[in-house]
Amino acid sequence: MKFLDLARVHIRSGGGGAGCVSFRREKYVEYGGPDGGDGGRGGDVWAEAVEGLNTLIDFRYQQHFFAKSGQHGMGSQMTGRSGDDKVLRVPVGTEILEEDEETPIADLTEPGQRVLLAKGGNGGWGNLHFKTSTNRAPRKANPGQPGVERTIWLRLKLIADAGLVGLPNAGKSTFLATVSNARPKIADYPFTTLHPNLGVVGVDGREFVMADIPGLIEGASEGRGIGDRFLGHVERCSVLLHLVDGTSEDVASDARTILTELDAYSPVLMSKPRVTALNKIDALDDQTIAERHAALETELGTPVHMMSSVARQGVTEVLRALRSEIAPTRHSTDDESDAPWQP
């Protein structure tokens, strides 16, 4: 299944049915009078967040969603049938924007959450509504209100507890594959990750969701590379794991490049808790590890973990540091429901 996190769709609610001009004409009924029914109401267009979806690929093959219009009114005071609603089923974490792709309409972050995107038109009145003491036989009825037509954007931001950031080939995909059952593409060349990956990570009997996004490069905030397209997926994360390639000649510069791009993209990302880890220490000698570890801590001014995803060195300590930063509202230590199942 292909990954798609941005889609443009056209929606239109149903128009209301027209009112009816009708008169009661029955044998042996002395006084007939108007009996035109009202038109039915047009259907609405809704968006609903559902579980089981993690991409907007369905909206690539269908971009138009039209609700049904209401039925016209009929004689014998019969109201027309209301039009059926149209529901857009989107993944949890979908943000709905106006056509300018900037103005937010709604943010669906919980399963079952719904939002009305286009309200259907009301049905018109039949001539029965226009009967008065001086106008006993009105020949007037209202047309139904037209539906609402608009263009919107759907932007998916994956909901994860921890997000991986770093330069290409920093070892993000390898780390995710090591600590979870996710199987992202891994190779010895940059930009092997072309779309975000999610994995469920467990440590000390607790689980949380981790997101891996394509690597960032210098100038990503200005459109270079592809990583900036997916930074929105880590905006919802409670904590970021910043992986630095220990085999790089200048680890301090590499770390500063990532922080600069995060700050240029959004101050929200810079304000999030971060855990920094010097990766690939299995490929270095003790002296080089000590020098680069000290340089990285001096540059960032925060503690730096040392680990190797391939050799599984220091991985558990990094996971524990991440779990301690995750919002308590998501994973309360007092909630026994998160404990692993036992027979």
Image: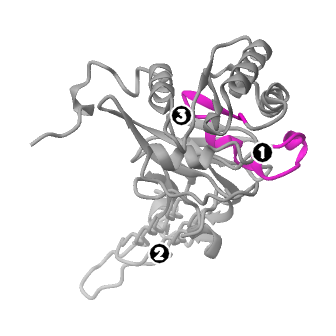
Q: Residue at x 71, y 22 (%)?
A: 287
* On-image quarter of the C terminus: top left
Amino acid type, callout 3: Ala
Q: Residue furthest left?
A: 343
Q: Position of residue 72 (x, y in %)?
A: 49, 75
Mark 3 highlights which residue? 162
Which of the 4 image quarters holds residue 284?
top right
Name the foreground residue: 121 vs 208. 208
Label 2, label 3: how far apart the Cα atoms are: 51 Å
Q: Position of residue 149 (x, y in %)?
A: 68, 62
User: Range of the magenta residues?
Assistant: 217-246
Label 2, label 1: how far apart the Cα atoms are: 48 Å
Label 3: few (<14), some or many (≥20) within 10 Å? Answer: many
Which of the 4 image quarters holds residue 190?
bottom right
Label 1, label 3: how far apart the Cα atoms are: 17 Å
Amino acid type, callout 1: Asp
Mark 2 highlights which residue? 71
Label 2: few (<14), some or many (≥20) within 10 Å? Answer: many
Mark 1 highlights which residue? 228
| 2 vs 3, front mark | 3
Q: Residue at x 33, y 74 (%)?
A: 31
Judged from the image, the secondary structure of the residue bearing numbered disc 1 is: helix
- Going from the N terminus, do you reach mark 1 or mark 3 first? 3
